[in-house]
Amino acid sequence: MRLDFETRATPAQVRRALTDFSERRLRTWHRSMDPKTYQVLDSGDTWAVAKESSSRSPFWVVCRYDWSDPDVVRWTITESSYGGGGEGFVRASPLGGGGSRVHAEWENTGARWTQKPLLFLIHVRPMRLVFRGMWKAALDEYADTDVA
C-alpha cells in the first residue's frame, strides 16, 4: 500500500504522533487502532515493539518500529495473525505554508493462502482512500492539540 497526502501537522509532529507509544497513541489513532489489541511489548529511545490492530479488522500484527533515522519512521512486522510479515515506512516533508506532505508505504508478505484474499482487499484503491482519510484526520487533529 502507498499513501500520499498533506496534513496540517509539521514533520516533527508527524514523527511524534508515529513514535509516541504512551497512552496518547490510542487517542491519536482512535479512528484506526483497536484499544483491545494494543500493547507495548518493549521500547527504547529510538524503537518500540507493539501489538496492534485496526478496529473491526480480523488481523493483528506485532511491529518493531524504528526511528533512529531522523527523517523516516520504519516498521517491520515480526508476528501476525495472518501468518506473514511485512514492512513499511513513513516520511514527512515540510510544505511551504506549514504542515507536511506525508508519504507512507507498506507491504504484507508471506501470508497463509487462506488469508491472502482478505489482505488483497485491504490494499486495493477504496481501502487506500479510507486509510489516507483516517491518517490525515488523525494527524490534523494531532497538529491542533499538540503542546510540545
Image (cartoon, grey):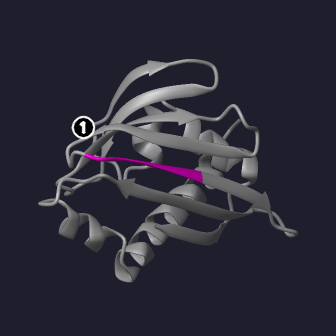
Mostly what secondary structure, the magenta segment?
A: strand
* Magenta stretch contains residue 72: no
Q: Determine whether the residue tagged by mark 1 lies in a helix, strand or loop.
A: loop
* Image quarter of the C terminus: top right
User: Looking at the picture, does residue 123 appear above or below residue 18?
Assistant: below
Residue under the image location 22 percent in, 51 percent down: 59
Residue 139 horizontal/vertical position (percent): 57, 56
> Which region of the structure is painted magenta?
84-89
Residue under the image location 54 percent in, 69 percent down: 3
User: Looking at the picture, does residue 131 appear above or below residue 58?
Assistant: below
User: Looking at the picture, does residue 10 appear above or below residue 65?
Assistant: below
Name the residue type under label 1. Answer: Thr
Q: Image quadrant of residue 105?
A: bottom right
The residue identified by callout 1 is 37
Q: Image quadrant of residue 32?
A: bottom left
Residue 22 appears in the picture as rendered: no
Residue 145 horizontal/vertical position (percent): 60, 48
Residue 47 horizontal/vertical position (percent): 57, 27
| In the foreground, 28 or 126 | 126
Q: Residue furthest right?
A: 96
Residue under the image location 74 percent in, 54 percent down: 10
- Horizontal relation, residue 35 to residue 78: left or right: left
User: Looking at the picture, does residue 91 appear above or below residue 15?
Assistant: below
Q: Residues within 10 Å of mark 1 (few under 14, many from 20)?
A: some
Q: Residue furthest bottom?
A: 126
- Horizontal relation, residue 79 to residue 128: left or right: left
